[in-house]
């Protein structure tokens, strides 16, 4: 329901008050009673038999009672008069207490607490004291338009481990503060109920500025506090460079390479040292990026190296493990040949090749698939990889190694594709819902597959009703008052079919029955709120009643009315909890008839309490 502006609400409240005042002014006032003079006391009359007691009658209650919020302290009630013509007025109950007695068919209840739900029931009375039954309660919530105060005393302080503690004082609100929204710049970090938040893993040398907004239950958001800013110093050295490799590049040259180090700010340089010079100190070797070449060396000599990484603040890592190379073996092994890949199953591939040759001797092989490396011994010319996914190409290359660290060029790639043999899971929670006397709507939960579901077949008995890519279908041109049963089969891209789901049955409505809304679905608008959408009923001029079902403390699922709308969309009240809330919708006509309820959809909160960096 669209929210009115404040000026519109005040105008409506004034109009309702004026109308109520007019109705009270038009009601006839009783004539003043004047006590007549007392005559002389006559002789007592002879006894007369008492008339039989009057039989009380039950009046018809008022109809179509509605309640609507007019402002943050007023709720307007209106209803249709009781069909009994002798009704004198109406008793209005707020909860179990009598709130008012009015002769009119409307009441503006003032002076209420804002942001609060009030429920009302009515009953009619006449001059004889006869009463009707109470009507069913109707409820409305007064508005809460006042935001909380900005959180005071906002502070940000550095904590060990590149963490920042953000603290603030509690805000105040006329109804109650329910949480705080912590912002870093224009990014929302978290919504919390406490007055502090620890932001973890923050990059150093970058100013971090925080602001905090207070939130109340009505969604009012305070002005921002702060900002509070802090910068974490850089005291962390880079990681040790990994996999330092040295190989002879000639009789007088050694080539070196290593995996790049990481740093919380950035690596500025690498320091590479060759050990064992006559002075007993390491000899610096110029490095470019993550590689270097040490030239002018002696032949047939073993050389060992270490590398460390340094950042711009002067923090340096520990030296890497040593890597050594001996000159002058310059001849790499031959390229592995006849490389062939074959799928052994839907999860495993085998790679085989012909052994390489070398002037000294092959010491092993490396099999590469992308960035993944499989080391293989010199006597083995095959490797198997398990745990793969079906219907994907896996391509491998092979390199041969010798004792001096010489590596052959990579072989041409060999590829294999494991077949997809696994069918999708059985579609779950298949539900059939009567839409009208000639239509049925079928919906279900998505199936899962190790590769991917591409579609569904909807069956009625042995007949194929529809092939769809979504999780819903509709069948038309059915007979009224007939039961129809449906099952669903999921299909993947390889043509694998899941077993059929258990049948879901429903009976088409009687032609006189109100047509139902259908295809109820959830559109998430935030981590804690959703929008419900559905296909309208074929019957025009109806309203839609939304039902919600949630678990109680005893674990029992109870269904209650959420609201009534003329649109085919609805935003449920309140914030979603972590446990699923389930919804259904029914159409209601002007006579109060209700259609069968739609398919059920469920949703839960996706909000997290941890700060994201």
Image (cartoon, rainbow, N blue to C red):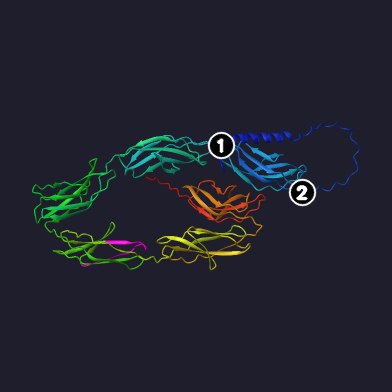
* Residue 425 visible in rendering: no
Q: Nearer the viewer, residue 220 or 592?
A: 592
Q: Residues within 10 Å of mark 1 (few under 14, many from 20)?
A: few
Report, in whole angstroms, how far the alpha carbon at label 2 lies from the one at label 1. 46 Å
Q: Residues within 10 Å of mark 2 (few under 14, many from 20)?
A: few
- Horizontal side of 92 relative to 353 (left or right) equals right
Q: Where's the C terminus, which quadrant?
A: top left
Residue 57: mark in rendering: 2
The magenta stretch is 379-396
| Disc nearer the start of the sequence (2/1) | 1
In front: mark 2 or mark 1?
Answer: 1
Residue 280 image offset from top left, x and y in percent: 10, 48
Residue 550: mark in rendering: none
In reply to whether residue 375 is colored magenta, the answer given is no
| Main secondary structure of the magenta stretch | loop
Q: Where's the N terminus, which quadrant?
A: top right
Quadrant in which residue 514 is drawn:
bottom right
* Residue 396 visible in rendering: yes
Q: Nearer the viewer, residue 475 or 136?
A: 475
Q: Nearer the viewer, residue 167 or 182?
A: 182
Quadrant in which residue 234 is drawn:
top left
Q: CB atoms at circles 2 and 1 under 8 Å apart?
A: no
Say which element carries label 1.
loop
In reply to whether residue 384 is colored magenta, the answer given is yes
- Horizontal side of 233 relative to 480 (left or right) equals left
- Horizontal side of 94 relative to 424 (left or right) equals right
Residue 552 image offset from top left, x and y in percent: 54, 53
> Which residue corresponds to mark 1?
5
Q: Using the image, determine if residue 511 lies above or below residue 196.
A: below
Residue 96 image offset from top left, x and y in percent: 64, 44
């Amino acid at each position: 329901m669209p929210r009115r502006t404040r000026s519109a609400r005040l105008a409506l409240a004034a109009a309702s008050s004026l109308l109520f005042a007019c109705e009270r002014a038009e009601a006839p006032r009783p004539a003043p009673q004047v006590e007549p003079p007392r005559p002389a006391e006559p002789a007592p009359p002879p006894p007369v038999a008492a008339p039989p007691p009057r039989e009380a009658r039950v009046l018809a209650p008022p109809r179509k009672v509605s309640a609507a919020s007019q402002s943050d302290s007023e709720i307007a009630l209106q209803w249709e008069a009781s069909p009994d013509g002798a009704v004198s007025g109406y008793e209005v109950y707020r909860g179990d207490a009598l709130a008012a007695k009015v002769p009119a068919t409307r009441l503006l209840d003032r002076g209420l607490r804002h942001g609060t739900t009030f429920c009302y029931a009515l009953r009619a009375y006449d001059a004889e004291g006869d009463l009707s039954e109470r009507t069913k309660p109707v409820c409305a919530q007064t508005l809460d338009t006042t935001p909380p105060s900005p959180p005071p005393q906002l502070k940000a302080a550095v904590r060990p481990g590149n963490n920042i503690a953000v603290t603030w004082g509690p805000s105040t609100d006329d109804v109650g503060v329910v949480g705080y929204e912590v912002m870093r710049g224009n990014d929302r970090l978290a919504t919390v109920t406490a007055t502090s938040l620890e932001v973890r893993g923050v990059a150093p040398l970058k100013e971090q500025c925080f602001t905090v907004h207070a939130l109340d239950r009505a969604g009012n958001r305070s002005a921002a506090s702060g900002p509070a800013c802090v910068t974490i110093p850089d005291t962390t050295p880079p990681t040790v460079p990994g996999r330092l490799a040295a190989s002879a590049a000639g009789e007088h040259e050694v080539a070196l390479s290593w995996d790049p180090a990481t740093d919380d700010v950035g690596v500025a340089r690498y320091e590479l040292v060759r050990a064992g010079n006559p002075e007993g100190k390491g000899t610096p070797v110029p490095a470019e990026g993550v590689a270097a070449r040490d030239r002018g060396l002696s032949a047939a000599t073993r050389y060992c190296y270490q590398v460390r990484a340094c950042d711009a603040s002067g923090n340096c890592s520990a030296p890497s493990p040593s890597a050594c190379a001996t000159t002058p073996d310059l001849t790499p092994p031959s390229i592995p040949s006849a490389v062939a890949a074959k799928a052994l199953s839907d999860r495993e591939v085998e790679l085989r090749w012909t052994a390489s040759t070398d002037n000294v001797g092959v010491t092993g092989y490396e099999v590469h698939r992308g960035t993944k490396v499989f080391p293989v011994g010199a006597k083995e010319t095959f490797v198997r990889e398990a745990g793969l996914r079906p219907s994907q190409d896996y391509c491998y290359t092979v390199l041969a190694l010798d004792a001096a660290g010489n590596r052959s060029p990579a072989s041409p790639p060999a590829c294999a594709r494991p077949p997809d043999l696994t069918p999708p899971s059985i579609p779950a929670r298949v539900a059939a819902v009567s839409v009208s006397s000639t239509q049925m709507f079928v919906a279900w939960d998505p199936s899962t597959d190790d590769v991917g579901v591409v579609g569904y077949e909807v069956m009625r008995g042995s007949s194929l009703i529809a092939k769809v890519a979504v999780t819903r279908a509709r069948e038309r041109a059915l007979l009224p008052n007939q039961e129809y049963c449906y099952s669903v089969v999921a299909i993947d891209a390889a043509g694998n079919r899941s077993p059929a789901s258990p049948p879901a049955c429903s009976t088409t409505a009687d032609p006189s029955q109100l047509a139902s809304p259908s295809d109820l679905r959830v559109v998430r608008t935030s981590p804690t709120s959703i929008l419900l959408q559905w296909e309208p009923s074929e019957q025009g001029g109806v309203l839609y009643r939304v039902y919600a079902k949630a678990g109680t403390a005893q674990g029992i699922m109870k269904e209650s009315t959420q609201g009534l709308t003329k649109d085919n969309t609805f935003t449920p009240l309140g914030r979603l909890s972590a446990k699923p809330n389930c919804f259904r919708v029914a159409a209601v006509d002007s006579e109060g008839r209700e259609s069968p309820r739609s398919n059920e959809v469920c949703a839960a909160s996706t909000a997290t309490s941890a700060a994201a960096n």
